[in-house]
Image: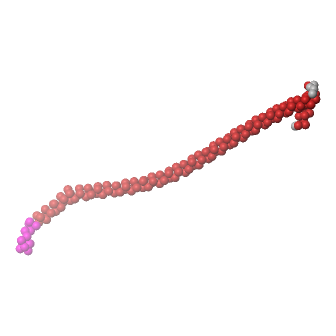
Amino acid sequence: MELLSNLGINSKLVLAQIINFFVLLYILKKFVYKPILKILEERSDKIEKGLKDAEESSKKLKEIEEKEKKVLTIAKKEAQGIIASAEQSAKAVKKEIEDDAKNRVEKILQDANKKLEEERMKMISEVKTEMANLVVLATEKIINEKLSEEKDKKLVEKIIDELG
């Protein structure tokens, strides 16, 4: 100890400083270091929780994106099915309309042909009648006498048969 006193170091003062250091160390540990560690631990826990939440959110986002892709794929398939069905329906309606139009045209043509045939027959009949009258007139002029109605009719029928 003399050595220390020769150096100008007071041993009582050094001992008091060592005691003060340990008291200060104890106070700092109890009142400062533990709360700081607690705050750091809480902050570390919050960061870990935030990272876990972010990771879970990322996983959920990926799952949602996959589900969205699946839903979009299904929706596209359904839309294609609906479009195909609509096209088939449109083709069926188009064919039905075309068939109906063809049937109407055929009916109109048949009716027109029937009317033409009727008109033709009517004209032939009128021509035959007119020819018969002309034949009768010509015959009368030739014979210069009027035949009886019965003879007249037989003569007309004979001439019509020969002409027809």
Residue under the image location 53 percent in, 51 percent down:
76
The range drawn in magenta is 1-14
Quarter of the C terminus within the rendering: top right
Instruction: Give residue 148's position: percent from left, percent from top.
Output: 93, 25
Quadrant in the picture for residue 153: top right
**What count of labels does the image hold?**
0
Q: Nearer the viewer, residue 79 or 30?
A: 79
25 w.r.t. 149: above or below: below
Left or right, 7 with reference to 105: left
Residue under the image location 54 percent in, 48 percent down:
79
Instruction: Give residue 49's position: percent from left, percent from top.
Output: 34, 55
Q: Main secondary structure of the magenta part?
A: helix
Quadrant in the picture for residue 21: bottom left
Q: Is residue 104 magenta?
A: no
Instruction: Give residue 150's position: percent from left, percent from top.
Output: 93, 26
Residue under the image location 18 percent in, 61 percent down:
25
Residue under the image location 85 percent in, 33 percent down:
131
- Residue 44 seen by the camera: yes
Q: Nearer the viewer, residue 24 or 84?
A: 84
Quarter of the N terminus within the rendering: bottom left
Quadrant in the picture for residue 102: top right
- Residue 150 seen by the camera: no
Instruction: Give residue 40's position: percent from left, percent from top.
Output: 27, 57
Q: Nearer the viewer, residue 117 or 20?
A: 117
Q: Nearer the viewer, residue 74 or 114?
A: 114
Left or right, 157 with reference to 72: right
67 w.r.t. 127: above or below: below
151 w.r.t. 42: above or below: above
